[in-house]
Image (cartoon, helix red, strand yellow):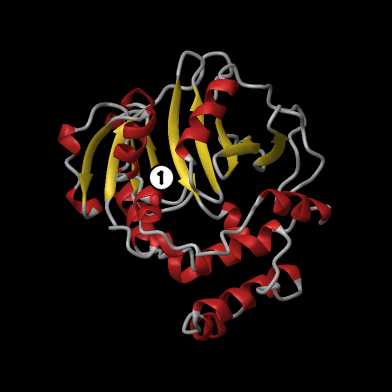
């Protein structure tokens, strides 16, 4: 869409807007009355499964207490500070290494990593954080839990990579009604010479033969040391929720919580082959009584 069409489209009610976004990617409209694919069902959930607590779960600051209350504070990355504007960050109070995040952003949007404060570009960091502050995931993707998340900046403790893999690998568990049915791993994210790779696995860490947005890694990421523990933690955090993706870090000697995502890739990235969109859709039982 050109910029004018985008502006016009954003004035549409959620259902019409999502229908157009879905058509743009899949060349067909979603079946709202009887959704079958995983992608269709995510759009349905955006419209009809609107529990207030979901806003807390996607808020990168507020979710920490939620997670600590359920699985324990030892799985939560410590917060070093929180501010309502990037310009208010108290740099002198931060250690030599830290991570900055906007509380309402998704994925790596609005994430700044500082490994050495003495050479850290504060101006560039503030620019990136302000770009994220100005981004509204609700308007772009109609992911309504983000609509009322306060736009803030948090500083977190910098976490050293897993010494066994030399990477801060995170494992994204697909949970359905409190049960893990699979996961997705992104690799090559820190390599400027490589495009990020996506690989999907079932709940026993068997590689699944489909692509979504990116190629598979040339060398598949090995099964993480704390795989079973991470599965248990993800299932605890996802109890009573039709579907949520729980992201966790495996550091070898411990596990840390990353974030919770209700709409994986916003349900708008094509599966190759398409049959896997239907297979994942079978796991997602819509709460039709809401």
In this rendering, position of residue 38 left or right of residue 228 = right
**Residue toward you, 279 or 150:** 279
Taking the spot 59% from the left edge, 22% from the top edge, the residue there is: 227
Taking the spot 49% from the left edge, 80% from the top edge, the residue there is: 10
Q: Position of residue 273 (x, y in %)?
A: 83, 53
> Does any portion of residue 168 appear in the rendered image?
no
Q: Position of residue 44 (x, y in %)?
A: 59, 66
**Residue toward you, 21 or 145:** 145
Taking the spot 78% from the left edge, 38% from the top edge, the residue there is: 208
Q: Is 96 located above or below residue 51 in the figure? A: above
Mark 1: few/some/many CA within 10 Å (<14, 14-19, 20+): many
Q: Find the residue positioned furthest to the front.
A: 289
Q: Position of residue 240 (x, y in %)?
A: 48, 46
Q: Is 263 located above or below residue 5 in the figure? A: above
Quadrant of the drawing holding the N terminus: bottom right
**Residue toward you, 93 or 273:** 273
Q: Is 230 located above or below residue 83 in the figure? A: above
Q: Give the number of marks.
A: 1
Secondary structure beneath label 1: strand
Taking the spot 76% from the left edge, 29% from the top edge, the residue there is: 206
Q: Position of residue 289 (x, y in %)?
A: 54, 64
> Does any portion of residue 155 appear in the rendered image?
yes
**Residue toward you, 253 or 98:** 253
In this figure, which residue is indicated by the disc labeled 1?
111
């Amino acid at each position: 869409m050109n910029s004018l069409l985008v502006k016009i489209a954003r004035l549409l009610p959620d259902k019409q807007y999502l229908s157009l976004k879905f058509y743009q990617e899949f060349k067909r409209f979603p079946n709202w009355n009887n959704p079958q694919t995983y992608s269709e069902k995510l759009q349905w959930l955006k419209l009809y499964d609107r529990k207030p607590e979901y806003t807390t779960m996607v808020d990168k600051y507020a979710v920490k207490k939620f997670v600590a209350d359920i699985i324990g504070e030892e799985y939560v990355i410590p917060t070093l500070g929180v501010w309502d504007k990037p310009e208010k960050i108290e740099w002198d109070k931060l250690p030599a290494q830290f991570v900055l995040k906007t509380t309402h952003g998704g994925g790596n949007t609005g994430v700044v990593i500082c490994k050495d404060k003495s050479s850290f570009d504060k101006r560039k960091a503030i620019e990136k954080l302000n770009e994220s502050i100005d981004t509204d995931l609700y308007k772009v993707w109609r992911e309504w839990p983000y609509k009322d998340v306060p736009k803030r900046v948090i500083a977190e403790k910098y976490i050293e990579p897993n010494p066994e893999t030399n990477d801060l690998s995170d494992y994204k568990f697909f949970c359905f009604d409190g049960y893990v049915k699979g996961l997705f791993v992104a690799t090559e994210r820190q390599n400027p010479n490589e495009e990020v790779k996506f690989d999907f696995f079932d709940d026993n860490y068997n590689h699944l033969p489909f692509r979504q947005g990116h190629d598979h890694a040339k060398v598949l990421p090995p099964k993480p040391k704390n795989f079973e523990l991470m599965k248990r933690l993800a299932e605890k955090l996802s109890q009573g929720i039709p579907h949520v993706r729980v992201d966790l870090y495996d550091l070898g000697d411990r596990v840390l919580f990353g974030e919770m995502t209700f709409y994986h890739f916003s349900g708008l990235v094509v599966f190759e082959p398409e049959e896997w969109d239907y297979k994942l859709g079978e796991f997602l039982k819509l709460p039709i009584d809401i």
